[in-house]
Amino acid sequence: MIANQEDEVLLRENKDRFVILPINYPAIWEMYKKHEASFWTAEEIDLSDDQKHWDGLSDGERHFISHVLAFFAASDGIVNENLAVNFMSEVQVPEARCFYGFQIM
């Protein structure tokens, strides 16, 4: 935590703001909207050939990919917990909280 919380705009107490509109921090909101636009779902991706491609990999390639995916799964959990426990409780600006909330999904 910084020495004086009032020096950091994102951490300033914000008792009177209960809704997102009007947007008071357009740069933060724009980053949230960019983040939102990059979100994809499994239904949007053709996964029908994945098994065939997986079977075509060598044992070493499958081992490497499995370990990379395991690393990112664990790392995402750590990042999400940090966002939920620390950032979402300390950051007071709704635009930034939207960004963090979307990132946790």
Image: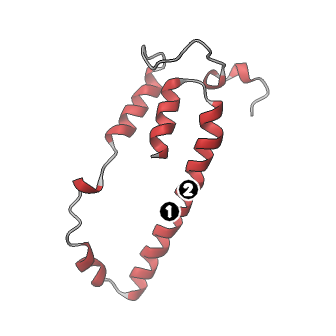
Seen as rendered, the residue at the extreme right is 3
Q: In the image, 98: left or right of 33?
A: right
Mark 2 burial class by Cα count in 10 Å: few <14, some 14-19, many 20+: few
Residue for point 45% across, 81% down: 63
User: Which label number is shown at residue 31?
Assistant: none
User: Which label number is shown at residue 73?
Assistant: 1
**Which amino acid type corresponds to the residue marked 1 in the rendered image?**
Ala
Judging from the image, the colouring scheme is: secondary structure
Kind of element beneath mark 1: helix
3D distance between C-alphas at marks 2 and 1 = 6 Å
Residue for point 66% across, 20% down: 12
* Label 2 with label 1: CB-CB less than 8 Å: yes
User: Which label number is shown at residue 77?
Assistant: 2
Instruction: Please state the horizontal and vertical placement of residue 51, each as a whole percent of the image.
Output: 26, 77
Q: Quadrant of residue 47?
A: bottom left
Q: Quadrant of residue 39?
A: top left
**Which amino acid type corresponds to the residue marked 2 in the rendered image?**
Gly
Image quadrant where one finds the N terminus: top right
Residue for point 55% across, 62% down: 74
